Amino acid sequence: MIILGIESSCDETAASIIQDGTIILSSTIASQVDVHHKYGGVVPELASRMHIEAITTVVDKAIKKAGIEISDIDGVAATRGPGLIGALLVGFSFAKSFAFARHLPFAGVNHLEAHIYSLFLMDEKPDFPFIALVVSGGHTNIYYVTSYNNLELMGQTRDDAAGEAFDKVAKMLGLGYPGGHIIESLAKTNTSDTIKFPRTMLEKDSFDFSFSGLKSSVGRYIHDNSTGSKDEKAQIAASFQEAVIDVLSQKLINAALYKNCDSIGVSGGVSANKTFVGKLMEKAKAKKIKLFSPSVELCGDNAAMIAARGYTMIQQGSLCDLDHDVFSRSKIE
Ligand code: KG4
Ligand code: ZN
């Protein structure tokens, strides 16, 4: 079964062709980062317009790269939410029209579920049940995953998402947008001692997160001490990253121990951070917990994960009608 997947929830227009739910025949992405870069974050109206400009070319490329004909496509899936409404509407409406014109089944995919599905696109897949952390620019959610369709939200951020904190700290340090990979690279050049920034763990047994205290603490440190030197920026970046990694890892392992699970999975843009995944792997190993993470192309937003989730929805007959709409916030947030 060949599925066309489309993703347009934020600042990436992506299309992918996958076969039988797990074989990626193509995955194309048109990133808008260069446009949003100068504004220090995503400008929703610009994002919608750029999706409109890119969508046809991106889908066309995905079909050509996969080496298939349009007539080979058996089903269509697109991100339904959560995300920016104007941006979502472009991919969702395009996919809906495509499916309608070709009489194909159409699935509207939850972006957060799809990030978890990126784990099933790897050779080594987690067995159920497992604990999943979706950690991106918009979410820091911990789920107890018992089957393809059952996710129990155990915790989420009460303020900034982890990726958002990376982006805001990068902005404070004058490093540009998006900040995650810039902070990670700069942190690697740090040779001085770390600065002890706070690790907010919240109430005992809570799996929620809060990163706004850490962000403010970094802001105060920059205001009070900063000389603006590259070395000092590296020290701040490394210390901030260390604090985020500590909290994410600790909560994730606590959640696995609480649910008696021996597998955890991380996905979403921040899971592209090798320092994070490396440290989490060490901590998990010490507790005999197995860690699963996607390859770097599947960490951030992509359409292969949308097609993978769409495949199971189409198989189960969980389809969208023509009058179904997109949503900005999800019930599983
Ligand atoms: O999943 P994603 O592409 O889009 C959302 O659904 O939000 O995640 C984007 C986020 C951004 O906040 C970006 O700074 C962060 O992922 N990110 C990273 C790294 N690469 C991307 N954060 C930390 N370290 C990285 N290497
Ligand atoms: Zn995402």
Image (cartoon, helix red, strand yellow):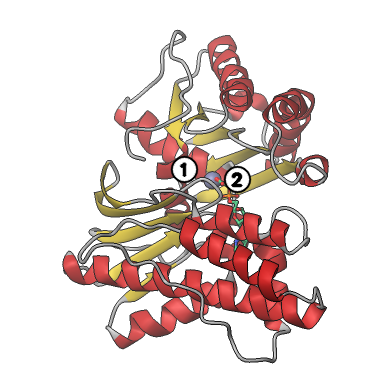
Q: Nearer the viewer, residue 248 or 261?
A: 248
Report which residue position mark 1 lands on.
308
Whether residue 20 is visible, yes or no, is: no
Q: Position of 226 compared to 317: left or right?
A: right
Q: Residue 287: horizontal and vertical position, in percent?
A: 27, 83
- Mark number, residue 284: none
**Identity of the residue furthest to the bottom in this view:** 192
Quadrant for the C terminus in the image: top left
Q: Is residue 134 above or below residue 315?
A: below
The residue at the point 47 percent across, 30 percent down is: 81
Amino acid at the residue labelled 1:
Ala
Total numbered labels: 2
Q: Residue 2: horizontal and vertical position, in percent?
A: 53, 35
**Which of the two discs, 1 and 2, sits closer to the camera?**
2
Q: Is residue 226 above or below residue 322?
A: below
- Mark number, residue 302: 2
Q: Nearer the viewer, residue 85 or 216?
A: 216
Amino acid at the residue labelled 2:
Asn
Please tell me how crowded label 2 is: few (under 14), some (14-19), or many (20+) other residues with Cα within 10 Å: many
**Identity of the residue furthest to the front in this view:** 224
Which badge, 1 or 2, is on the more N-terminal residue?
A: 2
Whether residue 25 is visible, yes or no, is: yes
- When asked about the image quadrant of residue 290, the answer is bottom left
Q: Residue 239: horizontal and vertical position, in percent?
A: 58, 78
- When asked about the image quadrant of residue 219, the answer is bottom right
